[in-house]
Image (cartoon, rainbow, N blue to C red):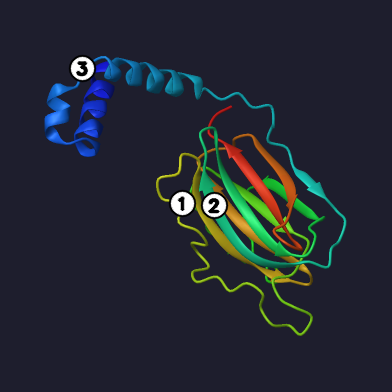
Amino acid sequence: MSRTLTTLATVSLAVLVPTAAVAAATPTPAPKLATTLSTAVTSSTCSVTWGSLPKGSSRSSSAVLTGVRSGQHACYDRLVIDLRGPIVGYDVRYVDTVRADGSGTPIPLRGGARLAVVVLVPAYDSAGQPTYRPVNVKELTNVTGYRTFRQVAWAGSFEGRTTVGLGVRARLPFRVFTLAGPGDGSRLVIDVAHTW
């Protein structure tokens, strides 16, 4: 691995520094870079204590859902549900089948396990107009290449609650928390660990 990192360091220098400067450079920075990168790789070992049991809060809210996005982190993949207004009510749990709100139709999801993410807010305003319109209900976000997430799909919004299906690689520990902002908005955050 050290040889690969040294090669990467040399290639990086060649891109950033003129060719004459690379020829004159001493090889001492590359081992230091290799050591730093090697330490970063080994220090990324993750330990979580979240567990895989259901997590939730049953209080209602006047917020509406406005967006769904995802991201990758060293120890987990993250799903964020954006809302206009304060979030207080949600239920996130592993299920055999995620079902569409209202109809109960099964929502197919890739992966070895499925999380039902239920937010106790609608995805429409008081006039019944949508506040969130997924471009593709089967792929709310592109999770190609994620270590844990396999698919994020829309399961609907009905009678003041919205469900998102999250297909994951296996039944892994997860945590759920809320964040205020930006502005008068809020966010529901679901992190699913890469390992136990």
Q: Which label lies toward us, 2 or 1?
A: 2
Q: Where does the image place residue 175, in percent across and percent down from the top left?
A: 69, 39
Q: Which label lies toward us, 2 or 3?
A: 3
What is the secondary structure assignment of the residue under circle 3? loop
Contact, mark 2 vs mark 1 (Cβ under 8 Å): yes
Q: Where does the image place residue 103, in percent across and percent down from the top left?
A: 68, 71
Disc 3 from disc 1: Cα separation:
42 Å
Q: Counting residues from the N terminus, which is met first, the one under dot 3 or under dot 1?
A: 3
Question: Quick one: label 1, few (<14), some, or many (20+) residues within 10 Å?
Answer: some
* Residue at 52 percent of width and 22 percent of height: 45
Q: Counting residues from the N terminus, which is met first, the one under dot 2 or under dot 3?
A: 3
Q: Nearer the viewer, residue 57 or 69?
A: 69
Q: Nearer the viewer, residue 157 or 109?
A: 157
Left or right of residue 104: residue 69: left
Q: Where does the image place residue 140, in percent across and percent down from the top left?
A: 52, 62
The amino acid marked with disc number 1 is: Val
